[in-house]
Image (cartoon, rainbow, N blue to C red):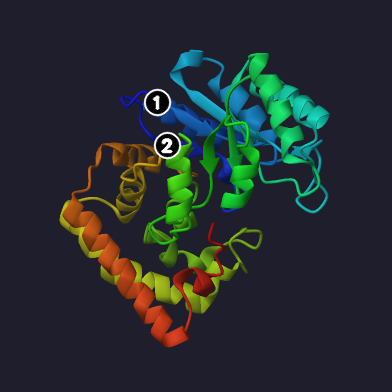
Amino acid sequence: MDKQVNRVGLGTFPFAGVFNRITKDAATLIVKEFIDKGGYYVDSAPLYGFGEVEAWLGEALKGYPRESYNIATKCGYVDVEGKTFQTVRKSARFHEVIAECEKSLKRLRLSYIDIYWVHSPDPITPFEETIHALLTLKKEGKIREIGVSNVTLGKLREYNKSGDVKYVQNRYSLLNRSILREFQVYMRRNSIQLIPYQVIDRGQLTGKVFEDLGNLHADDLRKGRSDWQPNTLEVVSNWVKSSLFPIADRLGITIGQLSIAWALSKTFVDFVIVGMTNPKYVEVNLKANSIELTKETIKDIDEKYRELEAAIQLKYGKTIAEFRGIRIS
């Protein structure tokens, strides 16, 4: 990756209206603001809006030079148009990966995709069959790099038997330290980098979300999830306010910027994915790319994390991940 490129990526899952309702015009404005302000990496998937978000992106980006952005999308779910999360079918079979790539290219109005992800492992299809499809697409010039998402270390090893996986996309943040040391060692030894999502934990690491909890609409994806239960949120909210806010305030940055900069400070992280639904936060988030945290600041954040971990262990007899219901890779 060109180190001059802004490493704060745009996550487009929120464009599907899973948190706050958003119109095509509003999404288009965010995309254009992102590129115009120096953003580079854009992450999408056919599953987002069941084809609609990819189509919006294709229209929003059509006026920009192809080399001015890096776009990633995914395979693993088929015939998404008109489906719901309950009715869409998962498959990473050879012929379906090939067909779904063609559909994504058409929706995106592109001739190639920079990073093509396996959205999540297909428990039925052999790993070798999926990788064969991806290598075929790469040989044809329709994709540039191969990535796998939502994988355990065991599954990553299976996908990477041929040594062709270049990226992993898993959930990771200063609150959700889900990439364990063994996972990091494997990535380093195999020249694989992480492009994490939920680096601000769907808003929990911004501070603002706790002010808006009573205003989540009925269809908000966060409602009812294990890490969004009232008691869990109260514990996290208090920690963010008492432990992270003073650090961010001392540096003159937002909690969200602190969280993004922390993720970017990790040597195994390439880009990070940040979902945005309000154009006023685009430039704020992009500025996190230029924030370099000192060793002392990172040590301070890590100490605050360990304090939270100890408090949860003492009161609930659980790790932070167990308390929040988060799977660790």
- Few, some or many C-alpha atoms within 10 Å of disc 2 (few <14, some 14-19, many ≥20)? many
Question: What's the residue at 65%, 63% (across, down)?
Answer: 218
- In which quadrant will I find the N terminus? top left
Question: What's the residue at 52%, 76% (across, down)?
Answer: 230
Q: CA distance from mark 2 to mark 1?
A: 9 Å
Q: Secondary structure at mark 2?
A: loop
Say which amino acid is labelled 2. Phe
Does residue 105 show up?
no
Q: Going by the image, does 162 lie left or right of 237?
A: right
Foreground disc of the pair 2, 1: 1
Say which amino acid is labelled 1. Met
The residue lying toward the viewer, choosing from 206 and 41, is 41
Q: Which is nearer the N-term, disc 2 or disc 1? A: 1
Residue 211 appears at what percent x and percent y? 41, 66
Question: Can you tell which quarter of the image residue 165 is in?
Answer: top right
Residue 149 appears at what percent x and percent y? 60, 44
Asked if the residue under mark 1 is in contact with the one under mark 2, i.e. CB atoms within 8 Å, the reply is yes
- In which quadrant will I find the C terminus? bottom right
Q: Residue furthest bottom?
A: 315
Residue 263 appears at what percent x and percent y? 36, 48
Question: What's the residue at 60%, 37% (across, down)?
Answer: 160
Residue linked to disc 2: 271
The residue lying toward the viewer, choosing from 307 and 30, is 307
Residue linked to disc 1: 1
Question: What's the residue at 24%, 55% (across, down)?
Answer: 298
Check the image and report above or below for 322 versus 184.
below
Q: Going by the image, does 257 lie left or right of 173?
A: left
Check the image and report above or below for 308 versus 198.
below
Check the image and report above or below for 240 versus 41.
below
Does residue 301 show up?
yes
